[in-house]
């Protein structure tokens, strides 16, 4: 159904529209997290190459890299936990669905 301008149709928002909203938000958040982690790893690599043997800068770089990898592992682990519960309960936890009576 096309509800664009000039379509001539009367489109009323319903609760089913929230499914798409939540899926879009989830996709955007995961995309931003992935880009941020990638950039943090690139920045840490550049900082490490420019440290020049300075222990303080190397330690700062190690912390940045540790946090970036920790964030990546947290995202992967949370997805695996959701899939684990989905497998054992049979409930579809990776799709947001509103059931209407």
Image (cartoon, helix red, strand yellow):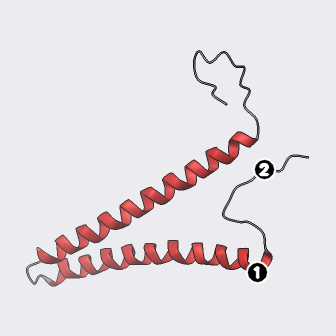
- Taking the spot 58% from the left edge, 74% from the top edge, the residue there is 78
Which residue is denoted by mark 2 in the rendering? 98
Taking the image as shown, residue 76 lies to the left or right of residue 56, namely: right
How far is the residue under mark 2 from the one under mark 1? 22 Å
- Answer above or below: position of 58 versus 14: below
Q: Label 1: state its secondary structure.
A: helix
Q: In the rendered image of this protein, does residue 70 appear above or below residue 27?
A: below
Query: Which residue appears at 71% of the width and 25% of the height?
Result: 11
State the residue at coordinates (86%, 46%).
100
Query: Which residue of the protein is positioned furthest toward the left in this rendering?
Result: 52
In the figure, residue 13 lies in which quadrant?
Answer: top right
> Residue 12 in the image: x percent, y percent?
74, 26
Query: With respect to residue 70, does 23 lie above or below?
Result: above
Q: Give the residue pinned by disc 1.
A: 88
Residue 10, given in percent of the width and then of the height, sits at: 72, 20
The residue depicted at 78 percent of the width and 69 percent of the height is 91
């Amino acid at each position: 159904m096309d509800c664009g301008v000039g379509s001539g149709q009367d489109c009323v928002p319903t609760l089913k529209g929230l499914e798409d909203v939540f899926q879009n938000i989830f996709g955007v958040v995961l995309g931003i997290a992935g880009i941020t982690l990638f950039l943090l790893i690139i920045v840490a690599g550049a900082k490490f190459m420019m440290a020049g043997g300075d222990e303080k800068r190397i330690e700062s770089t190690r912390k940045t890299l540790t946090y970036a990898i920790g964030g990546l592992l947290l995202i992967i682990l949370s997805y695996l936990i959701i899939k684990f519960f989905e497998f054992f309960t049979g409930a579809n936890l990776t799709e947001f669905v509103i059931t209407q009576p």
